[in-house]
Image (cartoon, helix red, strand yellow):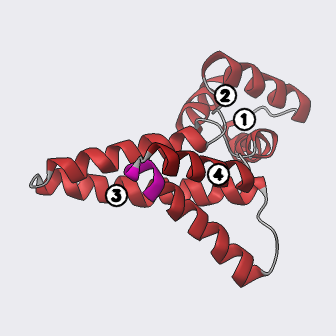
């Protein structure tokens, strides 16, 4: 996902009069502007992913508090939809069988053999997938594959 694609999605949301989607996409765009102003550089795809992950975390926390309060169902539904929209902006996560194959490949290439090597394995998985993998699942798989 690039900044241009997000800006195009903002235009589409405006045309469709989708206030919830427009609101969350504008928040993403604000994160881009912060990077451009503070760091004086163009936003990269890695920045987009980082911004979206940060917003997902914040929005999920707000959703959790809203569900606990239980007093405004419309707001809770909007927050839930915003999380879905944000998750749709992220690259596909590597998981399941594909993750298992990648773990086997990294173990053989790096010659990993013990559970002490799990940190190296996770670091290499992060590099190869740009951090887009199911970390708890990977740690469990790695624990069973490394003795």
Of helix, strand and loop, which mostly describes the magenta segment? Answer: helix
Query: Could you say which disc has been placed on residue 133 in the image?
Result: none
**In the picture, residue 1 is in which quadrant?**
top right
Please tell me how crowded label 1 is: few (under 14), some (14-19), or many (20+) other residues with Cα within 10 Å.
few
The residue pinned by badge 3 equals 61
Q: Which residues are magenta?
A: 19-23
Q: CA distance from mark 2 to mark 3?
A: 37 Å
On the image, the x and y values in percent for residue 90 come to 61, 42
Of marks 3 and 1, the one in the foreground? 3
- Distance between the Cα atoms at labels 3 and 4? 23 Å
Q: Earlier in the sequence, mark 4 or mark 2?
A: 4
x 56%, y 45%: residue: 12
Residue situated furthest front in the rendering: 15
Residue ID at (66%, 40%)? 132
Q: Residue at x 76, y 53 (%)?
A: 45
Q: Earlier in the sequence, mark 1 or mark 4?
A: 4
| Position of residue 117 in the picture relative to residue 133 (left or right) | right
Task: Give the residue pinned by disc 2.
Answer: 147
Residue 14 coordinates in the image, percent (x, y): 50, 51
User: Between marks 4 and 2, how big is the CA–CA gap?
Assistant: 44 Å
Q: Nearer the viewer, residue 106 or 33?
A: 33
Alpha carbons under labels 1 and 4: distance apart: 43 Å
Task: Between label 3 and label 4, give the one nearer the viewer.
Answer: 4
- Looking at the rendered structure, the secondary structure element under dot 2 is loop
Which residue matches tag 1? Answer: 114
Q: Which mark is residue 6?
A: 4
Q: Element under label 3?
A: helix
| CB atoms of marks 4 and 2 within 8 Å | no
Q: Is residue 53 left or right of residue 104?
A: left
């Amino acid at each position: 996902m690039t900044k241009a694609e997000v800006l195009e999605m903002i235009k589409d949301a405006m045309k469709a009069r989708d206030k919830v989607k427009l609101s969350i996409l504008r928040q993403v765009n604000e994160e881009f502007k912060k990077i451009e102003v503070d760091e004086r550089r163009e936003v990269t795809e890695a920045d987009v992913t980082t911004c979206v992950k940060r917003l997902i975390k914040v929005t999920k926390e707000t959703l959790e508090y809203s569900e606990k309060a239980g007093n405004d169902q419309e707001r809770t539904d909007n927050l839930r939809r915003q999380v879905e929209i944000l998750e749709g902006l992220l690259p596909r996560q590597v998981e399941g069988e594909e993750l298992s194959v990648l773990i086997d490949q990294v173990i053989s290439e790096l010659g990993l053999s013990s559970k002490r090597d799990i940190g190296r394995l996770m670091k290499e998985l992060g590099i190869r997938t740009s951090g887009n993998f199911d970390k708890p699942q990977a740690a469990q798989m790695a624990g069973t594959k490394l003795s």
